[in-house]
Amino acid sequence: MRRPQRSRAAEAFGPSFWVFVAVFGLAAWTVWELKGAAAVREALANDLDILVFLAPRMIGGMLLAGLVQAILPPDLVARWVGEESGMRGIIIGAVVGALTPGGPMTSFPIVVAFYMSGADRGALVAYLTGWSLLGFQRTLVWELPLLGEEFTLYRIAAVIALPVLAGVIARRIPLGPVGPGREVDGAVAPADRAGRG
Amino acid sequence: MPGFFGPSAFILWGLVAAAFVIALRQPGARHRQGVKRGVDMLLVNGPRICVAILAAGFISELLPQDLVAAWLGADTGWRGIVIGCAVGPFFPGGPLVIMPLVLALFKAGAGVPALIALLATASTWGLHRILMFEIPMMGGRFTALRLVSSIAIPPLAGLFAAFMVAAFGAPAPVH
């Protein structure tokens, strides 16, 4: 947390917040015009139900992400994966990816650290794919509560093998050296920023 | 709607407790640091999450149900999957934006295979993340390698989902 700290309030109520507010206002106004006040009330009530339902999961998910980040600093995780190679490296990359909480501000510094510690391209691709398709935090915080257990189960079953597949394919694609060319030190810095859920 | 504390909340809070204990037993006040990070994330993202959910609820009221069903519905077969794959990369932002919108589409009649394909492209081919994080941090060559390696993922995910729907029936929205 050595960055010059922009205040949390400034971050929370930054431009993207106001974009959401504008979209919400516009959508609510359109519903009012097209369907009347009763439809607005009904939509609001339904939204509030979802928010109440989501709140305990959201709070738990963010605490979990923070705790896991504190327990497992990126360079430690990178050392594990960097030492593995072959099919084992790909599978471990995919699993560690799925276990990485948080958004791209957490995962990309880890990928850079993997690269620095010598992980091969298959493991790097498997990691990023595992994180984006199977990230456990997103599933617990967002998918299970919003879309339901059955949907989540179907989706996980449909994609569970695919990060490994992507890693295997990546290893076979003939392409010269890949990786961050320069300024890797600068790139690692965002690791300390609070990631998106 | 399922209860306030369904299975997903129990699993989640169990993991929180486990992580807290692990952090507590490590040297150097890791638990305090972890909780602080979590609270920071919550404070930064909380307001946006609330407004995003509110907006998604109204958007789902406005989505033309017959159109959603015709383009992404369960009966559209491979066409819904292809459309899901095609629109996924253009969904901006993380789960904060994508998940409420997918819920809106689900409620408006989109089919499960199309939505699973959409989520898979949004995850693997999300342009916003590629431009903001991957190219700056990992370089263009690596990004190209990863994109080519994962090109088959969204259609495969949609296809597997379609098999499951055919075999076990389609999940319905819970909200």
Image (tube, rainbow, N blue to C red):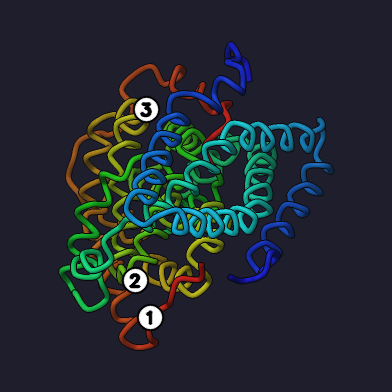
Q: Secondary structure at mark 2?
A: helix
Check the residue under mark 1 and report the chain it is in. B
Is B170 left or right of B1, judged from the image as shown? left
Is B54 left or right of B32, judged from the image as shown? left
Which residue sits at x=34%, y=18%?
A182
When the figure is inspected, residue A115 is found, relative to residue B59, above or below; the finding is above
Residue lying farthest bottom? B167
Name the disc covering residue B137, or none: 3
A94 vs B121, nearest the viewer: B121
Label 2 neighbourhood size at 10 Å, few (<14), some (14-19), many (20+)? many
Q: Quadrant of residue A115?
A: top left
Quick check: do tags 2 and 3 share a chain? Answer: yes
Label 1 neighbourhood size at 10 Å, few (<14), some (14-19), many (20+)? some
Counting residues from the start of the chain, the first of labels 1 and 3 encountered is: 3
Quick check: do tags 1 and 2 share a chain? Answer: yes
Which residue sits at x=56%, y=57%?
A45
- Quote the CA–CA distance across marks 1 and 2: 7 Å
Check the residue under mark 3 and report the chain it is in. B
Is disc 1 in contact with disc 2, using a CB cutoff of under 8 Å?
Answer: yes
Quadrant in the picture for the N terminus of chain A? top right
Which tag is nearer the camera, tag 1 or tag 3?
1
When the figure is inspected, residue A3 is found, relative to residue B170, above or below; the finding is above
Quadrant in the picture for the C terminus of chain A? top right
B167 vs A12, nearest the viewer: A12
Residue matched to label 2: B112
Is B10 left or right of B133, judged from the image as shown? right
B145 vs A90, nearest the viewer: B145
Q: Secondary structure at mark 3?
A: helix
Residue matched to label 1: B170
Name the disc covering residue B9, or none: none
Q: Amino acid at mark 2?
A: Val
Q: Amino acid at mark 3?
A: Met
